[in-house]
Amino acid sequence: MYCVYVIYSKSIDSYYVGETIEVLERIEQHNTSFYDSAFTKQCKDWSLYYNIDCDNRKQARQIESHIKKMKSKVYIQNLKKYPEIVQKLKNKYN
């Protein structure tokens, strides 16, 4: 099942949003610099902050894109705080 994941690094006080099938494997890849992403290579303490189960990859990519376009830590924190936001996103991109 596809999901949108939000990982957090305490050392740089920052979030990263992505989509995947296997979230734990993906976090390990970010922590070991498996990807050439300059952003996630900054540190090795990424941990799962939140994930959203999606119906398919298209929905996951649309929700990921929506969250990234918001460019807001508060918005990301509110996803976890207010589950109704996530439900609205899933309905919008169904």
Image (tube, grey):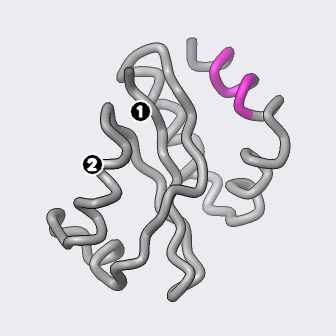
Where residue 74 sits in the image (x, y, percent)? 77, 62
Q: Is residue 64 left or right of residue 57?
A: right
Task: Give the residue displayed 73% in from the left and 23% down from the top.
Answer: 87
50 part of magenta stretch: no
88 part of magenta stretch: yes
Where residue 88 sits in the image (x, y, percent)? 75, 24
Q: Is residue 12 above or below residue 94?
A: below
In terms of image quadrants, where is residue 33?
A: bottom left
In terms of image quadrants, where is residue 86?
A: top right
Task: Give the residue displayed 50% in from the left and 22% down from the top.
Answer: 54
Task: Give the residue displayed 47% in from the left and 14% down from the top.
Answer: 55
Which mark identifies residue 25? 2
Q: Is residue 85 left or right of residue 89?
A: right
Question: For the stretch drawn in magenta, what is the main secondary structure?
Answer: helix
Q: Which residue is mark 1?
A: 61
Determine the secondary structure under disc 1. Answer: helix
Q: Which residues are magenta?
A: 86-91
**Closer to us: 26 or 88:** 26
Q: Is residue 2 left or right of residue 49?
A: left
Question: In this rendering, which labeled residue sits more in front, label 1 or label 2?
Answer: 2
Which mark identifies residue 53? none
The residue type indicated by label 1 comes to Arg
Where residue 26 sits in the image (x, y, percent)? 29, 51
Q: Is residue 83 above or below residue 75?
A: above
Q: Of callouts 1 and 2, which one flags the residue occurring earlier in the amino acid sequence?
A: 2
Q: Label 2: few (<14), some or many (≥20) within 10 Å?
A: few
